[in-house]
Amino acid sequence: MSDLIEITSGELTARINPLGAELWSLTDSQGREYMTDADPAFWTGHAPLLFPIVGSLNGDVLRLDGAEYSLPRHGFARRSIFAVVHSEESLARFRLTDSPETRAVYPFGFVLEVTFRINGLTLSVEVSVTNPNAESLPFSFGYHPAFAWPLPGGAAKSAHKLVFECPEPQDIRRVSAGAGLLMPVGEQTPVEANVLPLSEDLFRADAVIWDHLSSRKLSYGADGGAWLDIAFPDTPSLGLWQVPAAHYICIEPWAGHADPEGFTGDFREKPGVVLLDPGASRSFRMDVSARPV
């Protein structure tokens, strides 16, 4: 394991692994943990960054200009060592660029930079993608943080809920078993106005997905316990996931999603893909603010 990089405001402390530029821990001044316990009985991830794809491609194949490349679920960033380009008490910045290994599965140059910053009880994460190519850069990006469920503070797991910024009456989406492809028919939403009561039963059919979410903020927690306020102004899709009975819930803002079932088109034409102009950059921010008990 790489040595973790620690940043702190005194009120909140984050520890980040350069492998994947992955947030491993988020604790308050009393040492209470707001992230997953990463119990290997369920899932050892913490908060992987998903690039250059979110979810699965049909057959794990990226099709581009008549060529095919093998690219497994969620892409390669989460398994790549990022360079630590800056680190101070409350800020750390990491960078990943293309290599012969990445070009073998994704034939583009790119610069992926991740900045973690803490101010008071808020952790801000900003991921920027820069296109150094003479052609457009197609990609998707997603956050995949696994927060503690239950959160510290003593509230029961069954009391936890999500409170969205806006009502979310639209159908949710699911992915197919095994292949992980976006199924064509939605399901009636479990959201009641703007509140989603959380239960493990929600995840027995895998992730809960909104491919077009109205909200760009939500709160996660339980009355009488701690809360997290999560803002994601730059990502229009959202996934929720856990392995039932695990001690975490993944709240995942995405720009993109898995291939729809049956999709065999060019990657540039995939629903949800971002096309970045030559020389341009695009940023995706997520703010996580703790409200301890």
Image (cartoon, rainbow, N blue to C red):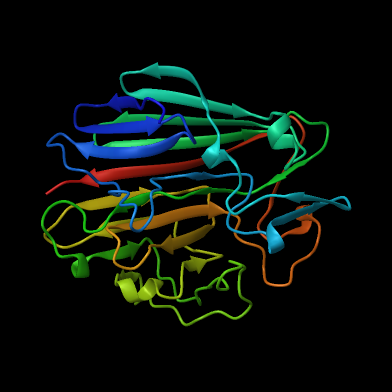
State whether residue 81 appears in this view: yes
At horizontal 59% and vertical 44% (from top left) the residue drawn is: 51
Q: Is residue 140 left or right of residue 8?
A: right
At horizontal 21% and vertical 54% (from top left) the residue drawn is: 151
Query: How many labels were placed on the picture?
Result: 0
Q: Is residue 55 left or right of residue 168?
A: right
Q: Could you say which is closer to the camera, residue 121 or residue 245?
A: 245
Placement of 57 over or under 4, stated as above or below = below
Q: Is residue 120 left or right of residue 259?
A: left
Position of residue 79 measured from the top left corner of the image (x, y, whole percent): 53, 39
Q: Identify the residue at the far right of this view.
A: 66
At horizontal 64% and vertical 45% (from top left) the residue drawn is: 52
Position of residue 26 measured from the top left corner of the image (x, y, whole percent): 28, 39
Placement of 160 over or under 5, stated as above or below = below
Position of residue 256 measured from the top left corner of the image (x, y, whole percent): 61, 55
Locate the N terminus and report the quarter of the image it occupies: top left
Position of residue 184 measured from the top left corner of the image (x, y, whole percent): 64, 77
Q: Identify the residue at the far front of this view.
A: 41
Placement of 12 over or under 194, stated as above or below = above
State whether residue 131 appears in this view: no
The image quarter in which residue 130 lies: top right
Q: Is residue 115 left or right of residue 221?
A: right
At horizontal 38% and vertical 42% (from top left) the residue drawn is: 287
